[in-house]
Amino acid sequence: MNIQSTFNCLCTFVTYFCALMKKIQLQHPIFHKVQQAAENLQLESFVVGGFVRDQLLGRESKDIDFVCVGSGIDLAHEVARLISPKLKVNFFKTYGTAQFVWDGWELEFVGARKESYQEHSRNPIVENGSLTDDQNRRDFTINALAAAVNKGNFGQIIDPFQGLKDLDNGVIRTPLDPDITFSDDPLRMLRAIRFATQLNFHIEEKTLQAIQRNAKRIEIISQERITTELNKIILAASPSIGFKLLDETGLLAYIFPEMTALKGVEYVNKQGHKDNFYHTLQVLDNLAANTDNLWLRWAAILHDIGKPKSKRFEENNGWTFHGHEVIGERMAKQIFKKLKLPLNQELKYVQKLVRMHLRPIPIARDEISDSAIRRLLFDAGDDIDDLMLLCEADITSKNEAKVKRILQNFRIVRIKLKEIEEKDRIRNFEPPISGELIMETFQLNPCREVGMIKNQIKDAILDGEIANNFEEAKALMLKLGIEMGMKTK
Ligand code: ATP
Ligand code: MG
């Protein structure tokens, strides 16, 4: 065993031992500052929620939430003062919260509170409360764990709902009646699924059933909050876990019906097609193993989204989905709009990958010609590597030999792409002859012929008839112009 692994073992042991003792290690200097500030102000203070959960799981976190019995705003100011008089604290009197960033950590302070929801209003009535009141308002037992930061009990865990046990067993469960928890704030249903996906945890049966019963209430939640959770699911190691749960609970039909429409297999003359919902999830998981790029993962989700609309059964060919990539490209825009996802370069990128996701397939299948490779490079530009990742992830046949064979072909395509790119520099191809030069040479005003010459030069380069350089392109321009009856000046 080397020093590093001995050290890791020791850390795991200490963490485990501390959890057994219901204690947590609070090593970061911020905790001692909060302890000092809490003593100066005589406030009972705790670190609570996500940080405690993640610390016990050995996950990294970026934000720390503190709760005190009293004014969270006063506590934040005192902590900031102890760190540096220059630190700026943002605070919101109406909500009793304060926040500042220190050393890359986002620190939040709030006074312990009690929340009660009423049938007719989405916003709770908020009153000052005890730590227990504050733990009661939290969404899951594993998110309701608190650890004291006062002198006498530093690091002591307060766990009223057996959150430690749930953390150990990998269970998501609401502290109170799940129907009330979800009806009060329906976003919690998505959070349950998000945590189950990120942590690979199991949603306890009663909690899961309550999500099924309350799914429709997700409609009262703002699109921005929904989409934030959806993106967190998509960024998990196996996003399919989340999508299957969204589907099972009925939430998917409310928040993303286009994806539900991918479900199912239809048969004609005993011939079925693949279930495009499960296929898409497999593509997404395959891709997730190779990239953390959220937008590339979105391209996987949307690559076959046009299939239900293009589905036909043809006597000779069986099931076909002609043009689904073009329909998918259009649908991507509608979906991005509805989900309030960014409509600029992110959408353009996803649309391009959806539109092009079939392009490398025939190239890999047939004899690989240089000109097909050049055209692929020209159309994909800098997104060629991402397109190849998507195409490779799209191979989901159960026939292992077939998957191996196609992947091998794609490997050859990749080698060819590299060779041709090194030789011909097509990726960011700028035609070596500009429209201006054509007009100047033949004394033309802007007209159709200028475009024709430009296009023919581009095609000649992509087809390998001439090299991608100025001299050969200029020679071809002169030849084409003369053939068209033009005169040089
Ligand atoms: P992450 O930071 O990974 O998104 P988190 O659990 O830390 O996960 P935050 O949004 O940082 O989530 O919230 C911090 C804590 O506040 C949670 O751990 C939970 O105790 C509580 N919380 C957040 N959102 C809700 C909610 N909608 N309902 C009840 N409690 C919530
Ligand atoms: Mg957090």
Image: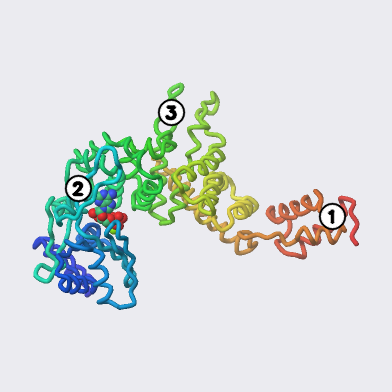
Which residue matches tag 2?
Answer: 171
Which residue matches tag 3?
Answer: 272
Check disc 2: other Cα within 10 Å, few if <14, some if 14-19, many if 20+: many
| Residue at the image position 38 percent from the left and 36 percent from the top | 254
Mark 3 vs mark 1, CA separation in Å? 58 Å
Q: Secondary structure at mark 3?
A: strand
Classify the position of the N terminus by image quarter: bottom left
| Disc 2 to disc 1: CB gap under 8 Å | no
Which residue matches tag 1?
Answer: 445
- Amino acid carrying label 3: it is Gly
- Amino acid carrying label 2: it is Val
Check disc 3: other Cα within 10 Å, few if <14, some if 14-19, many if 20+: some
| Marked residue nearer the N-terminal end (2 or 3) | 2
Q: Secondary structure at mark 2?
A: strand
Between label 2 and label 3, give the one nearer the viewer: 2
Mark 2 vs mark 1, CA separation in Å? 72 Å
Confirm if mark 3 falls within 8 A of ligand 1. Answer: no
- Amino acid carrying label 1: it is Asn
Counting from the top left corner in percent of width and height, residue 376 is at 60, 51
Report the residue that reaches farthest toward the top: 269
**Residue 31 in the image: above or below residue 462:** below
Confirm if mark 1 falls within 8 A of ligand 1. Answer: no
Location of residue 72 by image quarter: bottom left
Mark 2 vs mark 3, CA separation in Å? 38 Å
Check disc 1: other Cα within 10 Å, few if <14, some if 14-19, many if 20+: few
| Residue at the image position 34 percent from the left and 71 percent from the top | 88
| Residue at the image position 21 percent from the left and 69 percent from the top | 8
